[in-house]
Image (cartoon, helix red, strand yellow):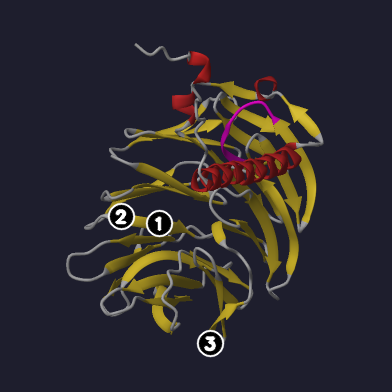
Amino acid sequence: MENKDKNNIKIKKPVRSPKSLTVVVCVLAAVLVISIALIFVVSQKIDSLAGADKQLKLSGQSGFSCEYSEAQKLYPFSEGVLKVTNERISYLTISGNDIYSSSISYQNPQCVTFGDYAVVFDLDGYAFTLVDTDKVLYSKPTENKIKAVDVSENGTVAVITDSDSSYGVLLLYDVNGTPLSQWSSYNSGYPISCAFNGDSSLLAVSTLNTNGAVVVPYVRLFTLTEGDKGTEVADNAIFTTEDSVIFSTLYFVGDKIYCFTSNSVYQISGTEMSKIDFDFSSINRVTLVGDKMYIVYSDGVSQLNKLAIIDGNNTVLYKSDIGSEVNAVCTNGDLYAISVDKRIFIYRGSALTDDISVDEDILRMGFISGDKLCVVSSGGVHTVN
């Protein structure tokens, strides 16, 4: 029998094919690219959160403490806060004491405030309530489901509802609850949003007509004129564009109407509507402050939010990164405050005046006593000077 020597056996090592090497290189390259991108985003966020002018412990400020579930029901309003639940509207002082309260029965209560007036309404429900700083002014039922509400400086309330017989209905009430107008949209499409001008003499309503191959946006302009018989409302003008867009937000600035989509800005001047050449990839929030518009936007998904300030001449006065998550904004005169992450930035005009770091998550804010802030946080209600 022949004996085989193990030392003479040659073991052949596997050779990695060029194809497998290519896959490995591609995977490593992809990981490197993702890592560089993450480092860039994190470094941007760190830069945006660095260097606050001052740090505040909110629990050490005046106000009152409450659980997070209670804080979610609080809205800064004038010199106090409104507490809105499914069963009750209460106006409280900054210390948490009751000024007045009223019973309601709303399934999904929402609150809109402007100056000394606030509207609490049942979203997708059938009732709303107007209050001021002294009392509940009135409550009204609606025939159809409420979709949106706005209130003007003089207490005029605009209510948008759905309808079985038209695309939707716009209801107008004066400060005493007297019905002023009921406009049904038959040809312009679904009413989406509305806005009053500064003296409450004009109301702009955005609509969207989907009855065709392409969607068509419209802006309807109504005039509100004081006469011997009270306020008279007239359908004054209609504007549109060939672009298939949705005007989600409207604002009056001087004699112009600005119309905002998710990524663009249009203006109505005279009898013409035109698109303005701005570069806003994703508009998240727009706020009117005096004659300036504060626009929070980003360059895309998972990108840092930026703030741009533009005036009625379409000039960009300010632009800067502000952070990741916008929590709340508020205005008073030419003051604008925005809470981003755990920072509060305060602007006057187009200049940043304060940069404050806080230790709690902020839910809502409002100005009180001029330039003092009322902050509703996860731990309660606090004032910030």
Tag 1 and tag 3, C-beta contact below 8 Å: no
- Disc 1 secondary structure class: strand
Question: Identity of the amino acid at label 3?
Answer: Glu
- Disc 3 secondary structure class: strand
Q: Nearer the viewer, mark 1 or mark 3?
A: 3
- Disc 2 secondary structure class: strand
Quadrant containing the C terminus is top right
Q: Nearer the viewer, residue 298 or 78?
A: 298
Look at mark 3 in the image and give the residue it sits on. Answer: 272
Q: Nearer the viewer, residue 42 or 285?
A: 42
| Count of numbered circles on the image | 3
Compared with 287, 130 (above or below) is: above
The mark found on residue 146 in the picture is 2
Whichever of labels 2 and 3 marks the residue nearer the N terminus, that label is 2
Residue at 26% x, 77% y is 211
For the residues labelled 2 and 3, the Cα–Cα distance comes to 31 Å
Picture coordinates of residue 198, whole percent (x, y): 58, 67
Quadrant containing the N terminus is top left
Picture coordinates of residue 266, whole percent (x, y): 55, 75
Q: Can you tell which quarter of the image residue 355 is in?
A: top right
Picture coordinates of residue 367, whole percent (x, y): 65, 43
The mark found on residue 97 in the picture is none
Whichever of labels 1 and 3 marks the residue nearer the N terminus, that label is 1
Q: Is residue 360 magenta?
A: yes
Magenta residue span: 358-366
